[in-house]
Amino acid sequence: MPPKSIRVLRVGQRYVRDDRTFTHLCLVSRALGAESIFLEDAENDLLSTVEEVNRTWGGEFRVVLGEPWRKVMKEAKAEGRRTVHLTMYGMPLQDKIPELRALDNILVIVGGPKVPGEVYHEADHNVAVTSQPHSEIAALAIALHEIQAGEELKKNFGKSKLKVVPAPKGKRVIES
Ligand SMILES: C[S@@+](CC[C@H](N)C(=O)[O-])C[C@H]1O[C@@H](n2cnc3c(N)ncnc32)[C@H](O)[C@@H]1O
């Protein structure tokens, strides 16, 4: 399966400063093959954190701050990218997989505590990772993994300062 172009959008207000959730959304998106994430109201510090991760471990993952979600969805649609909104109320992921794997350009949308109804109506697909409530980070990770049929696990992150040498025990890291 050729690599897909996958971008991630996080929609919805933050009631508390949940920097950890935002950092984890970025790290999971990056590690599991997405090329960028759009976050409406994250802190600027996140940009430097992710840039440092890119410098150390490779790749060119991008964080885009401050773009209104409507604009991101509209532009995605205008360029032919299909929008896949993750929600417990959507259609089961396992039933949508053949259709989703056939797409090359995707915007995966995850919500926060409150997602505007418009997102459900505007999204091309509303997809559930089980019909039980859990977490946007877990839903995103499973959806990225299933959509790419596990190919993202073999992604090469190119030039980096450090590389892990997989080891059955302990930690092996080389400078490259
Ligand atoms: C705090 S949860 C809110 C749960 C929400 N009632 C919903 O629509 O899924 C925040 C985000 O996690 C994601 N999420 C949570 N459970 C999910 C599930 N079972 N399937 C897909 N996405 C889920 C959704 O993107 C949701 O907007």
Image (tube, grey):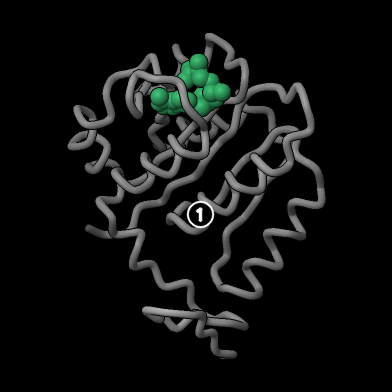
Q: Residue at x 58, y 12 (%)?
A: 116
Q: Residue at x 65, y 66 (%)?
A: 53
Q: Is residue 109 visible?
A: yes
Where does the image place residue 79, in percent across and percent down from the top left?
45, 38
User: Which quarter of the rendered picture does the C terminus lie within?
Assistant: bottom right
Q: Residue at x 52, y 41 (%)?
A: 8
| Vertical position of residue 82 compared to residue 173: above or below | above
Among the 4 quarters of the image, the one containing residue 52: bottom right
Taking depth in this image into account, of 54 and 122 the one nearest to the observer is 54
Label total for image: 1
| Vertical position of residue 163 compared to residue 60: above or below | below
Are there few (<14), some (14-19), or many (20+) residues within 10 Å of tag 1?
some
Q: Is residue 86 visible?
A: no
Taking depth in this image into account, of 40 and 152 the one nearest to the observer is 152
User: Which quarter of the rendered picture does the N terminus lie within?
Assistant: bottom left
Q: Residue at x 66, y 73 (%)?
A: 55
| Vertical position of residue 79 compared to residue 111: above or below | below
Question: Which residue in the structure is indicated by mark 1?
Answer: 35
Where does the image place residue 137, in percent across and percent down from the top left?
52, 39
Q: Is residue 21 left or right of residue 107?
A: right
Taking depth in this image into account, of 155 and 20 the one nearest to the observer is 20
Q: Is mark 1 within 8 Å of ligand 1?
A: no
Disc 1 secondary structure class? loop
Q: Is residue 85 left or right of residue 146?
A: right
Q: Check the image and name the residue furthest to the front.
A: 169
Where does the image place residue 157, in percent across and percent down from the top left?
48, 72
Amino acid, disc 1: Glu
Where does the image place residue 19, in percent across and percent down from the top left?
73, 41
Q: Is residue 135 left or right of residue 82?
A: right
